[in-house]
Amino acid sequence: MTASAMMTSSFVDNHGFSSMVCMQGQGVVKGYAIGRAAIMSAAALEVAHYRIADEDVETECARLERAIVRAGQDLQTLIDTLPPDAPREVEPLLNVHRLLLEDPLLSEQACDFIRARHYNAEWALTTQGQMLAEQFASMEDEYLRERSADIRQVIERVLRVLSGTTSLLTNAETVDASDDPLIVVARDISPADMMRLKGARFAAFLTDLGGPTSHTAIVARSLNVPAVVGLGHVRMLVRDGDMLVADGFSGIVLVNPSQQVLAEYRQRQAAYLREREELACLRDAPAVTLDGIEVKLEANIELPEEAEMALAAGAQGIGLFRSEFLFMGRAGLPSEEEQYRAYAFVVKTMAGRPVTIRTLDIGSDKTLDGEVTVATNPALGLRAIRYCLAKPEMFSTQLRALLRAAVHGHVRILVPMISHMHEVRAVHQAIAAACRELTARGVPYSRNFSVGAMVEIPAMAIAIEPFADALDFLSIGTNDLIQYTLAIDRGDAEVSALYDPMHPAVLRLIAHIINAGERVGKPVAVCGEMAGDARVTRMLLGLGLKEFSMHPQQLPDVKKEILHAHSNALRMKVATALNRAARIDLEELSA
Ligand code: PEP
Ligand code: MG
């Protein structure tokens, strides 16, 4: 996303009249930062473009070639001297840049511009870079599209060598003189620059370009420094030393806010830091009720990198990895290799903890790009497992990637929207066929996996017994279970007041599933929004739930509730109410 919504508003503050600019980007690393702007140089925007004389052509080509070699050597040195605490994504990213610099096409075609058009080296290189970046940007494959950012960053490196610039910041002295924390403001930040900035006291990163999967986002996430990307023109609008507030939650950036606004954000920052400290204290404490019932707390993630956030929050595993986010917002489907890399990354990050990866849950509210649905009611149409079974090759590709990822740890394959037993059999057959295919190809995979299903269709919940027998585990998708039980479209604001997680019918279904799991000794989790809502934690404990999976940020609040709850007393209170199909009084459960 490059377009940014921008508003300006004015305030009278303690120091008189001040004007505040408010920009909207994408918050990719959560947290608040308040500090002074440190603008990063952008050689591509600053170098001079001029024509050279005939007799200087060969010298100019040689100057360009030397600069490209030098930029490559600098990168190699950086790779060789990476500190042990460097985020592990950095080295492969730096290697991509080094390979781009070694490609003879880069210097050959830029030298063609010097010879044919008499451009100076900087101009020739920028022109060549723009052409390459545009070619990559128009490619269908998302991976190749992202390479256009690499081209821009590599060109920037060479331009810096050509201009002899060593400082990354436009005004290092102002920055050195400031006592406030500093916020880097850049057009884009390459992984190599991130490594140079890493040691300094930067409180946040703001960039014009980039999205949630850009290098800035990935590295900032590993460094745990708040970041907002895709701001459009932040580098042009902000001056060195401007006071900034960066909100990594909402993606809002305030430039020169009033004293009142600053005070408000300082409070939010302090509250957030306090919450983080509390979280740190609770992180490694087991979630055990007062009467000694152990509860498993896992995390829901949508992007592979979020596994780190899950670990930092103390999650005991991944209870739901919504794999559809690898498939959305792109042209074409991800290959087996790309999927394998994403799943293996999560499994390795979780270091032996179980990782539950849901097979593609597409349709209804989530659609693939370019796919036009003709279903009269997509929520009841060809979605999730129905869609996968209708596209056996696509399903098999995902299953093979999952089986290969199981080499690195325990993978739990979670199948969404099951309503019939024949679907369970079809899934088992598809998995067996994927194993045979990998064996035939001689590709390593592991049988260290289990197969479970989301319980989110009332029919399955009511007739749960054969499913509990045939599957290794169950995970209740309350978001859809509520939608289908109450006939309330979960995305329709007009009926949202009727979307009632506490409806006795919903709670009876949840209790019925948990009891069936207990009877046959199969684990049952809840991974819908209810699991992360601390207001209903006691009620879920009262239903007998022992596995919760939620957004990592919700984990500490839920854990606090569990630590203060008495499970057996809750089970009795909840059972009494359910027998009468009466509404459960949440306040009474907290007493
Ligand atoms: C659910 O339905 O509860 C669930 C977790 O899946 P999703 O929200 O992705 O449909
Ligand atoms: Mg669902």
Image: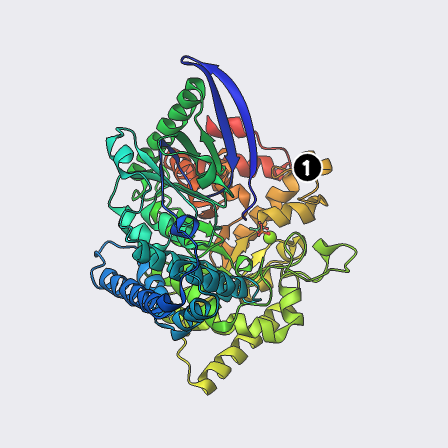
Tell me where residue 78 appears, x and y as whole percent. Answer: 24, 60
Q: Tell whether 34 sits left or right of 441.
A: left
Report whether the residue tagged 1 is closer than 8 Å to ligand 1.
Answer: no
Q: Tell whether 485 sits left or right of 409.
A: right
Q: Residue at x 36, y 57 (%)?
A: 159
Tell me where residue 272 appears, x and y as whole percent. Answer: 38, 31
- Residue 558 visible: yes
Q: Tell me which corner region of the image, top left, top right, bottom left or bottom right, holds residue 489.
A: top right
Q: Which residue lies furthest to the bottom in this view?
A: 440
**CA neighbours of label 1 inside 10 A, class few (<14), some (14 to 19), many (20+):** few
Q: Residue at x 32, y 33 (%)?
A: 278
Asked if 269 appears above or below 226 in the picture, the reply is: above
The total number of labels drawn is 1
- Structure colour scheme: rainbow
Q: Which residue is drawn at 38% across and 74% down?
A: 104
| Along the line of sight, the residue nearer the viewer: 326 or 131 | 131
Task: Kindly state the secondary structure of the residue where label 1 is placed.
Answer: helix
| Along the line of sight, the residue nearer the viewer: 353 or 227 | 227
| Along the line of sight, the residue nearer the viewer: 206 or 306 | 206
Asked if 209 appears above or below 129 in the picture, the reply is: above
Q: Tell whether 382 sits left or right of 159.
A: right
Amino acid at the residue labelled 1: Ser
Q: Mark 1 points at which residue?
A: 496
- Residue 350 visible: no
Tell me where residue 259 appears, x and y as whole percent. Answer: 41, 18
Tell me where residue 542 appears, x and y as whole percent. Answer: 49, 39
Asked if 336 appears above or below 311 in the picture, the reply is: below
Q: Which residue is drawn at 46% across and 56% down?
A: 523
Q: Tell whether 91 sits left or right of 441.
A: left
